[in-house]
Image (cartoon, helix red, strand yellow):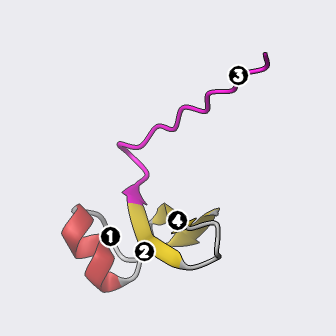
Amino acid sequence: MIRADVLNAHDAEILGLKAGDPTLISENRAMLKSGVIFDYSIDIHNYKNTKFLKLSNFT
């Protein structure tokens, strides 16, 4: 899931931005076939330096 939000003071300081600046947050879960989550991450992106590339394969 990718969502837009604003930075809190802690995350803004780490990214070298200001609290309240826009950000994109990506939340990722990887699951086994059984439904057990084995990887979970939340990534907070600096809006000035982030680009996403979506690849699709229609064969």
Mark with earlier residue (1, 2): 2
Q: Could you tell me the amino acid type at mark 3?
A: Asn
Name the residue located 22 percent from the left edge and 74 percent from the top edge. Answer: 13
Q: Which residue is mark 1?
A: 18
Q: Which residue is mark 2?
A: 7
Identity of the residue drawn at 62% across and 27% down: 55
Label 2 to label 3: alpha-carbon separation: 34 Å
List the residue tagged with mark 4. Answer: 28
Query: Gap in Å between the C-alphas at discs 1 and 2?
Result: 7 Å
Q: With respect to residue 1, does 40 lie above or below? A: below
Quarter in which the C terminus is drawn: top right
User: Is tag 1's residue or tag 4's residue first in the polypeptide sequence?
Assistant: 1
Q: Quick one: SS at disc 1?
A: loop
Residue 57: percent from left, percent from top? 70, 22
Q: Quadrant of residue 44?
A: bottom left
**Camera-nearest label, 4 or 3:** 3
Q: Badge 4: few (under 14), some or many (20 or more) residues near its Cα, within 10 Å?
A: few
Q: Are marks 4 and 3 in contact (CB under 8 Å)?
A: no
Is the Cβ of the residue at disc 2 closer than 8 Å to that at disc 4?
no
Magenta stretch: residue 50 in it? Answer: yes
